Amino acid sequence: MNRLTGKVAVVTGGSRGIGRATAKLFAAEGAKVAVVSRTRSSIDAVVSEIEAAGGTAIGVVCDVSDAGQIKVSIDQVVAAFGGIDILVNNAFDPSAPNSATLDLSVEQLQRNFEMGPISYLRLMQAAHPHLKASGEGRIINFGSMAGVMGLAGYAPYNMAKEAVRALTRTAAREWAAHKITVNNLLPLALTWGEDAGVPEPTNPLGRYGDPERDVAPVVLFLASNDSQYMTGYSLTPDGGSLIDSAR
């Protein structure tokens, strides 16, 4: 416990799934958390959960595909908490990822890039001065095992998520001198509804991950001093799905 005491964390896509689980765990570990998402009501629900458990959080409404909103949001967090130590780039648009390569439109590809590597880049750039001032800044970006595998039917999503990994590796090299680590997560977690019709898992552990029990603790590891000597890496809390795959 208390591994993030005194830290300020920004979690995008923080109103549901892995983002929600991460925001709650960070707060339980002592961080002041900015829960960032597009819908006020869903953000407020997470903030209320955190506060009811004794944690500290604010809700920040932001469409991360809008550069102007990103700047305002980062300024809002700094005004409320005095700085930023941890940035978790988790947001994406679940309505946009699916398309076969042959049918892929530039517009759909652009939406995936706007919500993925472009928004991640903008958030990283906006948060950079504060992460640098922290002296031990942490950035955790979300890629996807789908991109590594080239999952059929997800061409725009795969392309955007692999671009996130390239961004992560490059920033890790460039920002190490600023005492900022930049790592990537490729999770496989149950974040969809029970009626989604998802096939049974085929990974060695034989189940989909739980956002709270299986994925958020790995995000916490990358946000804490436990990972201070790691940067540029892709960690895979996926039940063994990517064993022996090219990464």
Image (tube, rainbow, N blue to C red):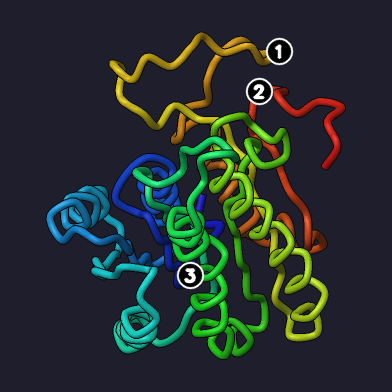
Q: Which numbered disc flags the more N-terminal residue, 3 or 2?
A: 3
Which residue occupies the foreground of this view, 132 or 113? Answer: 113
Which residue occupies the foreground of this view, 38 or 117? Answer: 117
Q: Do the residues labelled 3 and 2 touch (CB within 8 Å)?
A: no
Please, is residue 104 above or below residue 72 in the view? above
Can residue 30 be seen in this snapshot?
A: no
Which residue occupies the foreground of this view, 216 or 61? Answer: 61
- The residue most toward the left is 41
Q: Are marks 2 and 1 in contact (CB under 8 Å)?
A: yes
**Left or right: 63, with 122 as reference point:** left
Q: For the image shown, how many numbered marks are present on the structure?
A: 3
- Local packing at callout 1 (Cα closer than 10 Å; few below 14, some 14-19, many 20+) is few
Question: Label 1 vs label 3: CA separation?
Answer: 34 Å
From the image, tell me which residue sits under label 3: 119
Quarter of the picture holding the C terminus: top right
**Left or right: 119, with 95 as reference point:** right
Q: What residue type is labelled 3?
A: Ser
- Local packing at callout 2 (Cα closer than 10 Å; few below 14, some 14-19, many 20+) is many
Please, is residue 108 above or below residue 119 in the view? above
Question: Measured from the top left, where is residue 176 in percent x and y?
Answer: 79, 78
Q: Nearer the viewer, mark 1 or mark 3?
A: 3
Q: Which amino acid does label 1 sit on?
A: Pro
From the image, tell me which residue sits under label 2: 239
- Please give the name of the residue rendered at 51% of the width and 40% of the height, measured from the top-left corner: 103
Q: Which numbered disc flags the more N-terminal residue, 1 or 3?
A: 3
Question: Label 2 vs label 1: CA separation?
Answer: 6 Å
